[in-house]
Amino acid sequence: MYVLELGGQDDEFAACEAASAASGVELVAPGLARAATITERVSSLAYTHRASELVGTTDADVASARTLLSAAPIEREGTVAVRARAVRETADVSTQQAERELGQVLVDRGFAVDLDDPDHELRATFSGDLCALGWLETESVRDYGTRKPTDRPFFQPGSMDPLLARALVNIAGARAGTTLLDPMCGTGGVLIEAALVGARPLGADAQEKMVRGAAENLDHYAPDAAAATVRGDATHLPFPDDAIDGVVFDAPYGRQSKIANLDLDDLVAGALAEARRVASRAVVVGDRSWANEATDAGWNVENQFERRVHRSLTRYVVVLSR
């Protein structure tokens, strides 16, 4: 059993992404989830910071955590360090006291403490009325989170930030050996993250400048990816049935389609139908929910999320399967 430390403010969305790299994911407290198993893909998640082998859970106070650790079997050797964290200020606890007292328990059990480069790190995470103790197993590598769309060689306003794009491709099933398509690829933010988690990214866009720009951005961030971008109509994709593993697209926001003779509703409906023809899984983002249109196109709606970006923009995320 494992405990996952989630990031962001939307735990349901973070847990949905975590399920792409772990099994049996279940929220247990603000910012915390439990998982039955994990895979190496945890290290590529956007909204899971860490996964630890669960020692146990108890009340959110230092005395209870100390009692739990004192009674727990520990089949480890080498040096240790204790890191304590209070999630979003939901627990009234001194993390310094927790580190000190839990560290003393480990010293009393024969371990040497090494705060700089320990062989094992015990994490004590306090959230609400729960404390989870776990031995750190893996951390997500989130250096891309500081990248900004404006850092790309080719930039256009409205580009999706890397953290959200990474989460979407993970939810859509991107991983080594899979192919992920964005049929409205814009500047290629989704394609970049798909490439960086090991998937083959394919992009299409109605505008030639976007096709060229996405290719330029892909070459900059993932030069070794077997990527391809083409000018194309999202409602008539140049791919055979079931040729794609997952589809992600960010529908146009409150504006007319760039494809002649198609209004926005017809564009998205057609894109949803085509996505279902070529893939068995999709994630659609927009400034409104496209769940009804997805259902009309034959998709099953697995999940829906609302993510507030700023006062005038809320992104709606719909997760689809067939």
Image (spheres, rainbow, N blue to C red):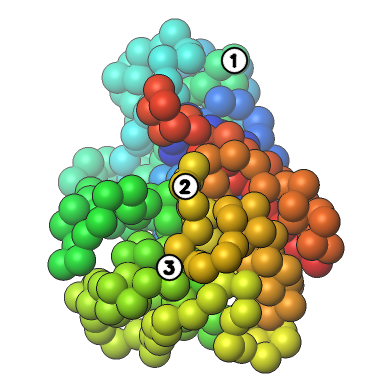
Gap between marks 2 and 1 measured at Cα: 46 Å
Q: Which residue is identified by label 1?
A: 129
Q: Nearer the viewer, mark 1 or mark 3?
A: 3
Where residue 53 appears, as percent x and y from the top left, is 55, 49
What secondary structure is marked by label 1?
loop
Is residue 150 visible in this depiction of the protein?
Answer: yes
Instruction: Identify the residue under disc 3.
Output: 185
Residue at (45% x, 63% y) in the render: 258
Q: Position of residue 290 (x, y in %)?
A: 67, 48
Q: Nearer the viewer, mark 2 or mark 1?
A: 2
Residue type, numbered disc 1: Asp
Q: Are marks 1 and 3 in contact (CB under 8 Å)?
A: no
State left or right for residue 165 relative to residue 10: left
How much space separates mark 1 and mark 3, taking CA atoms? 44 Å
- Inspect the image, locate mark 3, and give the three-letter code of the amino acid beneath it: Cys
Label 2 CA crowd tier, 10 Å (few <14, some 14–19, many 20+): few
Where 152 sits versus 251, above or below?
A: below
Mark identifier at residue 255? 2
Q: Is residue 310 above or below residue 194?
A: above
